[in-house]
Image (spheres, grey):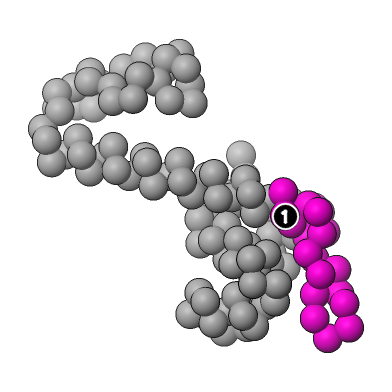
Amino acid sequence: MIDIELRVLATLIAVVECGSIAAAARRRGYSSGAVSRQMSWLQRRLGVRIFEPDGRSIRCTSTAVALATQAERVLAEFNEFEQIGRSASLTGRRRGDVPGGGGVFGGVVGVVDDGS
């Protein structure tokens, strides 16, 4: 399993949308160096080239665009995951209640006893 932090995915999205490390750093509240290190780490971790040098700037590869699109989906799914958890804790759902009817697992996953 790949251990990529959600903040790295959000940074990737920012770089692709902004078109530069500096602009993405401003958007995310990071230094340019921090964004550059995150993107270098991601390239090494995935073993693909995400950005190409283009003079003093970078050019996003088609892989970067595809990864950013998928990263948006992952972050949206995680946000939904958090909402379900918060909703369950606030509404006092009973053990065994499965909101959403199975989601990405299509109902394959059984109910796990959470110890309550």
Whether residue 100 sits left or right of residue 87 in the image: it is right
| Residue at the (72%, 49%) spot, across then down | 66
Q: Residue at the spot x=16%, y=39% of the render?
A: 89
Quadrant location of the C terminus in the rendered image:
top left
Residue 8 to residue 20: above or below: above
- Most foreground residue, 11 or 115: 11
The image quadrant that residue 56 belongs to is bottom right
Q: How many numbered discs, if any? A: 1
The x and y percentages for residue 2 are 62, 45
| Amino acid at pointer 1 | Val
Image location (x, y in percent) of residue 90: 13, 41
Q: Is residue 78 above or below residue 30?
A: above
Q: Which residues lie in the magenta part? A: 47-66
Q: In this view, does 75 lie above or below 55?
A: above
Query: Between residues 55 and 47, which one lies in front from this camera angle?
Result: 55
Circle 1 SS class: helix
**66 vs 9, nearest the viewer:** 66
On whether residue 61 falls in the magenta region, the answer is yes
Q: Tell me where residue 99 appears, x and y as whole percent.
A: 28, 25
Residue 10 or residue 43, whichever sits in front? 10
Q: Where is residue 98 in the image (x, y as percent from the top left)?
A: 28, 22
| The magenta stretch spans residue 56 | yes
Examine the rendered structure and indicate whether residue 95 appears above or below residue 52: above
Q: Is residue 86 left or right of residue 68?
A: left
Quadrant into which the N terminus falls: top right
> What residue is drawn where x is 23% and y is 27%?
114
Q: How crowded is mark 1: few (under 14 residues within 10 Å), some or many (20 or more)?
A: some
Q: Is residue 90 visible?
A: yes
Q: Is residue 34 visible?
A: no
Q: Name the residue under label 1.
A: 65
Q: Residue at x 39, y 47 (%)?
A: 79
Q: Would you identify the image quadrant in which residue 38 lies?
A: bottom right
